């Protein structure tokens, strides 16, 4: 074993211990929802953005606040509403006049200039405002009146979204959905977790979640994720899964009947990154096929669309993805 490999193994071990403490700290504030917590942490470790989808009251906002505190990230929250404008997020230039009468423009930064932006109920804002996040999420910078402004590093958007069936929501455009590394579905907690939450959150004192890692630690973990080895078998499984999800001449009859458009190469990239991050989170040295199966739904469910006939028959996107994963089992 060479010195470089040995150093990487030691770093994986050290960061793995820190991440174990991170999960324990988050568990003090969020009860149950282990899959949601894991997928959100995978999003951060992969350097991406996450979309949390669920009805109000499932602790989505609390989860984002807790993660920001545990990782020591400078966080800001924007409540998306129908009258929210792009400048309310990005910022704007204002005309100022000095004591000598000289006028000049000064850029006032918006809340997007932070390390962790919580976009609460993102689909309650108009499409124009939603699209204001596009450049920032992809390029980690914004352009105002032709001038570029870099965002802090690391920069992550964790957005919450209400189900589209609810009144007063606007569907996110496909281009923006694709910017989210994972779509994390948040369901109701089980009975035991809800009972635990009920007892611990209605008293006088609530536990304060400690900071476990720093922003520099998070960046080091993100760099480590990209250095983790991936076996040829896992790479082949990723390519096979994503390519079988695309309708066309080579697709199965089920896919052609159920999927109107399939995932692009960004889905393969997302599976490669997130499988490494999940392995690191669980203290393993390399990802496995199990990681691909576990992460296929949150990676692919927002990068595909069902046909009208599939929706009419009650087929869900997760049903399609589950069937696509069957050959990997």
Image (tube, rainbow, N blue to C red):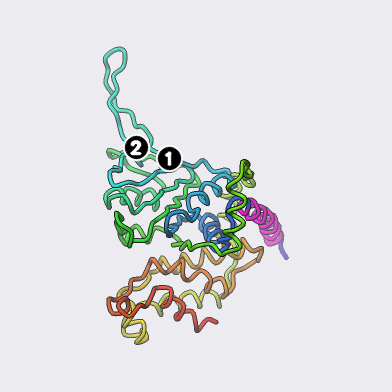
- Neighbourhood count class around disc 2 (C-alpha, 10 Å): few under 14, some 14–19, many 20 upward: some
Residue 307: give x, y in percent of width and height.
29, 76
The local secondary structure at tag 2 comes to: strand
Residue 19: give x, y in percent of width and height.
64, 55
Q: Residue at x 41, y 80 (%)?
A: 244
Tell which of 246 and 27 is nearer to you: 27
Residue 42: give x, y in percent of width and height.
54, 59
- Neighbourhood count class around disc 1 (C-alpha, 10 Å): few under 14, some 14–19, many 20 upward: many
The local secondary structure at tag 1 comes to: loop
- Residue where numbered disc 1 is placed: 113
Q: Residue 132 carries which label?
A: none
Quadrant of the rendering where the C terminus is positioned: bottom right
Q: Residue furthest top?
A: 100
Label pair 1/2, CB-CB below 8 angstroms: yes
Say whether residue 70 is magenta. Answer: no
For this view, does 46 lie left or right of residue 204? left
Give the CA separation, mark 1 to mark 2: 9 Å
- Residue where numbered disc 2 is placed: 91
Tell which of 266 and 27 is nearer to you: 27
The part of the chain drawn in magenta is 3-27
Q: In this view, does 158 lie above or below 9?
A: above
Q: Is residue 191 above or below residue 160?
A: below
Q: Which residue is drawn at 29% across and 47% down?
A: 82
Look at the magenta stretch and give its main secondary structure: helix
């Amino acid at each position: 074993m060479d010195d470089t490999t040995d150093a990487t193994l030691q770093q994986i071990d050290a960061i793995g211990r820190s991440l174990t403490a991170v999960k324990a700290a988050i568990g003090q504030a969020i009860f149950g929802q282990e899959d949601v917590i894991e997928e959100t942490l995978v999003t951060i470790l992969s350097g991406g953005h996450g979309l949390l989808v669920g009805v109000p009251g499932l602790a989505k906002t609390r989860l984002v606040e807790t993660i920001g505190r545990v990782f020591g990230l400078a966080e800001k929250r924007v409540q998306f509403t129908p009258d929210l404008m792009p400048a309310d997020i990005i910022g704007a230039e204002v005309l100022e006049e000095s004591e000598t009468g000289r006028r000049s423009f000064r850029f006032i930064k918006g809340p997007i200039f932070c390390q962790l932006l919580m976009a609460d109920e993102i689909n309650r804002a108009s499409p124009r405002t939603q699209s204001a996040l596009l450049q920032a999420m992809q390029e980690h910078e914004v352009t105002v009146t032709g001038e570029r402004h870099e965002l802090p590093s690391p920069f992550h958007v964790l957005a919450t979204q209400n189900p589209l069936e609810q009144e007063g929501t606007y569907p996110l455009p496909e281009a923006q959905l694709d910017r989210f590394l994972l779509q994390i579905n948040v369901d109701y907690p089980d009975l035991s977790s809800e009972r635990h939450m009920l007892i611990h959150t209605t008293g006088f004192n609530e536990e304060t979640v400690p900071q476990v890692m720093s922003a520099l630690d998070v960046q080091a973990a993100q760099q480590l994720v990209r250095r983790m080895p991936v076996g040829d078998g896992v790479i082949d499984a990723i390519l096979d899964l994503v390519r079988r999800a695309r309708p066309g001449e080579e697709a199965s009859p089920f896919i052609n009947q159920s999927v109107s458009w399939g995932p692009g190469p960004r889905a393969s990239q997302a599976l490669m990154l997130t499988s490494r991050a999940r392995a690191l989170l669980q203290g393993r040295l390399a990802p496995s096929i199990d990681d691909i199966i576990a992460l296929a739904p949150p990676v692919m469910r927002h990068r595909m669309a069902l046909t009208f006939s599939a929706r009419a028959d009650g087929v869900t996107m997760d049903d399609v993805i589950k069937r696509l994963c069957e050959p990997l089992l």
